[in-house]
């Protein structure tokens, strides 16, 4: 399919063309990268924007159940919802199960929704390298809300925050000790913390957990991009679909305030700069692992370092000289 034809079909809301385009941007082949860049440039003038919501949380917190219930509620409001779910890749085989469609059975059949699982490919702790470009494709296709789910490990929370307008952290009900295990860095980038599974016997525990997180958030330094009362912690039950509308109202309040105050557009501009720099970094790193004299040099120096024949710093200095760069 010609790039212009694919672009026109995406703009018309063709889901099959969108799926093919996401496959194209995820490809590592050089010719596919050129075509993907051409396609994204063709779509850029359309200027369509959706609300990008990043979602993270530890495995077992109920992310898939929440996304399905939340997504069904949004489509019932007449909103088109795209879900980009990043699946963990095996460090050994590189394979992924990509089971999100089976876990979100109702939402996957909703004509107003589009679910696309992507393998993390061991990149950036769980966010596929091309997820940002997939987000841009979904926006061009006219989706109002793009939900970006991470695997909830390592560095992925920080990275998904760099491609989201709102960052939502899902937590499970637990005792007070659980709060000690939450990284301060994750708390600092969260816009809203949702304590899930606030139903049945867990409801009182969830309420106490929500109060703990609310107290912890008040101790953090005030961020300029937040109105009074944010970031905040709330209770939801994805299973019983309680609290979802209230959570959506709060998300709209926050994103609306940021638009009015100019933080929304500034954040997107800062993110564009971040991803430009990230693209340069990743391309440079890729050159060191691609077959050729640079990889051979890296392997030879690595062997010398492993044998104790030279130090890591000296070997790095020599490698950088090969690249025509100075050692910082």
Image (cartoon, rainbow, N blue to C red):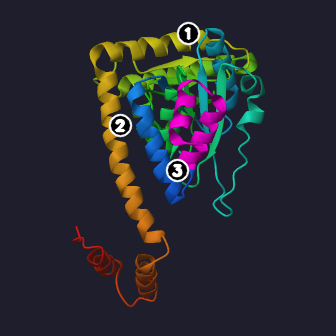
- Can you give x and y, in whole percent of width and height, for residue 25 in the image? 53, 46
265 vs 52, left or right, is: left
Check disc 3 and report the residue beneath it. Answer: 125
68 vs 135, left or right, is: right
Check disc 1 and report the residue beneath it. Answer: 246
Magenta-drawn segment = 1-26
Classified by dominant secondary structure, the portion drawn in magenta counts as helix
Per the image, label 1 sits on a secondary structure element best described as: helix
**Is 51 or 68 nearer to us in this picture?**
51
Q: Tell me the CA gap for discs 2 and 3.
A: 18 Å
Q: Tell me the CA gap for discs 1 and 3.
A: 31 Å
In the rendered image, the vertical position of residue 94 relative to residue 114, given as above or below: below
| Crowd band around label 3 with a 10 angstrom C-alpha radius: few (<14), some (14–19), many (20+) | some
Per the image, label 3 sits on a secondary structure element best described as: helix
Check disc 2 and report the residue beneath it. Answer: 271
Q: Earlier in the sequence, mark 1 or mark 2?
A: 1
């Amino acid at each position: 399919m010609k790039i212009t034809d694919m672009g026109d079909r995406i703009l018309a809301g063709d889901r099959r063309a969108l799926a093919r385009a996401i496959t194209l941007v995820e490809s590592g082949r050089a010719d596919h990268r050129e075509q993907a860049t051409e396609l994204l440039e063709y779509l850029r003038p359309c200027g369509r924007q959706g609300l990008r919501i990043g979602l993270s949380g530890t495995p077992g917190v109920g992310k898939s159940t929440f996304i399905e219930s939340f997504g069904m509620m949004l489509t019932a409001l007449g909103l088109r919802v795209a879900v980009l779910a990043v699946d963990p890749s095996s460090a050994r085989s590189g394979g992924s199960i990509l089971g999100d469609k089976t876990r979100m059975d109702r939402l996957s059949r909703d004509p107003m929704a589009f679910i696309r699982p992507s393998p993390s490919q061991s990149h950036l702790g769980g966010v596929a390298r091309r997820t940002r470009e997939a987000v841009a494709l979904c926006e061009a296709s006219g989706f109002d809300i793009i939900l970006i789910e991470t695997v909830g490990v390592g560095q992925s929370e920080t990275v998904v925050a760099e491609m989201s307008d709102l960052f939502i952290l899902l937590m499970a009900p637990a005792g007070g000790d659980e709060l000690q295990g939450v990284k301060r860095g994750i708390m600092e980038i969260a816009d809203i913390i949702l304590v899930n599974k606030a139903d049945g016997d867990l409801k009182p525990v969830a309420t106490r957990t929500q109060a703990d997180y609310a107290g912890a958030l008040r101790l953090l330094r005030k961020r300029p991009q937040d109105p009074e009362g944010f970031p905040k912690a709330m209770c939801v039950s994805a299973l019983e679909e309680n609290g979802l509308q209230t959570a959506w109202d709060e998300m709209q309040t926050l994103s609306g305030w940021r638009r009015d105050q100019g933080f929304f557009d500034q954040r997107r501009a800062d993110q564009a700069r971040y991803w430009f720099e990230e693209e340069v970094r990743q391309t440079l790193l890729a050159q060191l692992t691609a077959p050729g004299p640079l990889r051979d040099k890296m392997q030879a120096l690595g062997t010398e370092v492993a044998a104790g024949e030279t130090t890591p710093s000296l070997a790095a200095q020599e490698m950088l000289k090969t690249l025509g760069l100075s050692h910082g």
